[in-house]
Image: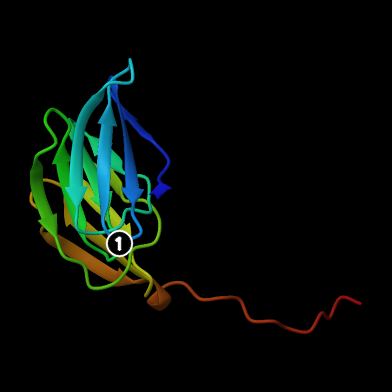
Amino acid sequence: MHLTAPTVHGNLLSVGTSNIDSTGSVLGFHEDGRIAYRHELPREVKWKPASRDGEIYVAGLDGGLTVVATDDGRTLWQSAGADALVGSPRVVEGRLFTIDVRGRLKSVDADSGSLEWGRDLDEVVSLPTASPNTNN
């Protein structure tokens, strides 16, 4: 089993898991260690969940996103992904940001899961080219 780094939100702590059968879960814990919720997922969770206003945003290794309510662990919305995500999702001002293995940055409406925009980063980021050192 793989565990993500924890996310702290209010008086709860959440951790994502990945299992050998390519499934996962997100677990919420109270301050005293009691389980607040457990939500099983059909995908592995490799990245630290994001949190906002009683919601946990979980990015699956398969690119899928799931939003879980911290009060009872119910699914608020989920979406399938086309490509594996890299790194933890981030929630900023009602938008959920992710990046996939193809270098595509996406902005998703955090309330509905609707894609707002996507941008291929290789269009705007380029590696510097090596040039001869002329300062010898």
Q: Is residue 67 above or below residue 69?
A: below
Q: Is residue 84 above or below residue 34?
A: below
Considering every residue shown, the one lying at the far right of the view is 136
Considering every residue shown, the one lying at the far front of the view is 21
Packing grade of label 1 (10 A; few <14, some 14-19, many >=20) is: few
Q: Nearer the viewer, residue 129 or 83?
A: 83
Determine the secondary structure under disc 1: loop
Please give the name of the residue rendered at 33% of the width and 15% of the height, measured from the top-left corner: 32
State which quadrant residue 107 falls in: bottom left
Please give the name of the residue rendered at 32% of the width and 62% of the height, measured from the top-left corner: 61
Image quarter (top left, top right, bottom left or bottom right) of the C terminus: bottom right
Q: Position of residue 23 (x, y in %)?
A: 26, 57
Colour mapping used in the image: rainbow
Considering every residue shown, the one lying at the far top of the view is 32
Please give the name of the residue rendered at 29% of the width and 70% of the height, measured from the top-left corner: 119
State which quadrant residue 51 falls in: top left
Position of residue 127 in the picture relative to residue 95 (left or right): right
Q: Position of residue 83 (x, y in %)?
A: 29, 72
Please give the name of the residue rendered at 27% of the width and 52% of the height, measured from the top-left corner: 24
Could you tell me if residue 94 is visible in this image? no
Q: Number of labelled discs?
A: 1
Residue beneath disc 1: 21
Q: Is residue 54 above or below residue 23?
A: above
Could you tell me if residue 58 is visible in this image? yes
Q: Position of residue 71 (x, y in %)?
A: 13, 27
Identify residue type, mark 1.
Asp
Considering every residue shown, the one lying at the far bottom of the view is 132
Q: Nearer the viewer, residue 82 or 127?
A: 82
Q: Position of residue 8 (x, y in %)?
A: 34, 29
